[in-house]
Image: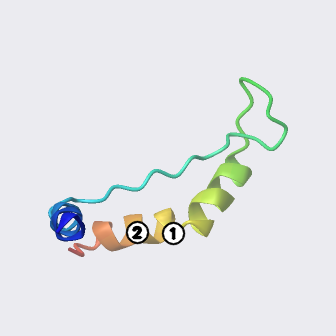
Amino acid sequence: NSLCEITSKLQACTPHFVQCVRPNNAGKPDVFDSFHVSSQLQYVGVLEMVRMIRYGYP
């Protein structure tokens, strides 16, 4: 019975995912490596998602 309750609560939820992006490989404050950040965003698919949204999907 409790498993059914948990399952129904989970099905009613909208999941959100958080992806942390490191600004540099050295871990130094106030240093931004645009190539490193771009590589991370490409790896997790953010750049492709932005392209799809730009063209109206969904």
Disc tally is 2
Q: Mark 2 packing: few (<14 Cα in 10 Å), some, or many (20+)?
A: few
What amino acid is found at the position of numbered circle 1 in the picture?
Gly
Is the C-beta separation of discs 2 and 1 under 8 Å? Answer: yes
Residue 57 spot, x, y in % from top left: 24, 75
What amino acid is found at the position of numbered circle 2 in the picture?
Met
Q: Secondary structure at mark 2?
A: helix
Q: Which residue is mark 1?
A: 45
Left or right of 53? Residue 11 is: left
Q: Residue at x 15, y 67 (%)?
A: 8
Residue 3 spot, x, y in % from top left: 24, 68
Q: Residue at x 17, y 60 (%)?
A: 9
Q: Which quadrant: the N terminus?
A: bottom left
In depth, the one of 31 and 9 nearer the eye is: 9
Q: Which quadrant: the C terminus?
A: bottom left
Q: Which residue is mark 2?
A: 49
